[in-house]
Each structure stands twice: as C-alpha cells, then as structure tokens.
C-alpha cells in the first residue's frame, strides 16, 4: 500500500541516496547486449527496431536504466527531492510526482 508513511519512507530513502553524492555513469550497449541484459524495467519492444545502440545511465551502486536524457555528474547536484503527489495508475501501478527543493 502507498500510504503517507510509505511515501515518506520512499522520500527519505531517495534523499539519503542523493546526499551520498553517488556518481552518474553512462555506458552504451549494443542492441544485442541490451536484449540479453537485466534491464527489463524498460520493455524491450518499446525500443525502436532501428536503434542499434542503447544508452544506459547508472546511479553508481544503486540503479541503472536505459535513458537518453540529460543527467547530473553526481546525485548531490540535484538537491533535495520532495514527493508532491501520488496517483493510482492501476492494480499494481502507482505514480509519484516529485519536485526538487531550491536551496
């Protein structure tokens, strides 16, 4: 269940990781390496067939995702994270909306 206590615990854990100043690492996998990898959080069939190389961004020692966005060099650069909203998106799917605190 995603009650207020659980959301507060998620927010606290995220801020703990942020404060650890973990490096952000970027690597590239061939399409074949990606399809054999454990990066199953992204449905492989969502990557267009013409994409032959997949960019993977890792929060050092914490998580890795296929991602094409812009990223900081380490987690501390983003400051403090605040959960601003939660949404029920189905039986086993919840969305957290976040904001970054200024200062």
Image (spheres, rainbow, N blue to C red):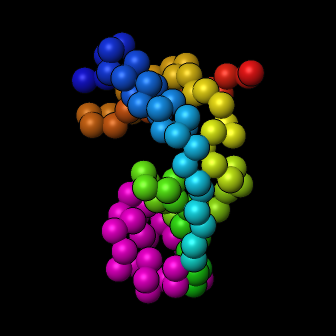
Residue at 41 percent of width and 31 percent of height: 13
Q: Can you see residue 49?
A: no
Front residue of 22/83: it is 22
- x then y, percent, for residue 15: 51, 30
Residue at 56 percent of width and 22 percent of height: 82
Front residue of 89/24: it is 24
- x then y, percent, for residue 24: 59, 56
- x then y, percent, for residue 50: 59, 83
* Quadrant of image for the C terminus: top right
- Please give the range of residues in magenta: 29-50
Horizontal side of residue 36 vs 15, given as left or right? left
- x then y, percent, for residue 66: 52, 63
Horizontal side of residue 61 vs 24, given as left or right? left
Residue at 52 percent of width and 84 percent of height: 30
**Among the 4 quarters of the image, the one containing residue 52:** bottom right
The answer to whether residue 19 is above or below residue 45 is: above
The answer to whether residue 68 is above or below residue 20 is: below
| Residue 89 is a magenta residue | no
| Residue 30 is a magenta residue | yes
Residue at 38 percent of width and 57 percent of height: 41
Q: Residue furthest top?
A: 4
Q: Can you see residue 44?
A: yes
Q: Residue furthest front?
A: 20
Front residue of 98/103: it is 103
* Quadrant of image for the N terminus: top left
């Amino acid at each position: 269940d995603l009650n207020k206590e659980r959301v507060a615990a998620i927010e606290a854990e995220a801020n703990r990781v942020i404060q650890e100043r973990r490096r952000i690492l970027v690597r590239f996998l061939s399409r074949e390496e990606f399809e054999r990898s454990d990066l199953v959080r992204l449905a492989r069939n969502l990557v267009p067939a013409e994409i032959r190389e997949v960019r993977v961004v890792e929060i050092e020692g914490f998580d890795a995702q296929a991602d094409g966005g812009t990223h900081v060099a380490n987690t501390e650069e983003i400051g403090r994270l605040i959960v601003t909203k939660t949404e029920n998106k189905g039986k086993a799917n919840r969305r957290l909306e976040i904001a970054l605190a200024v200062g």
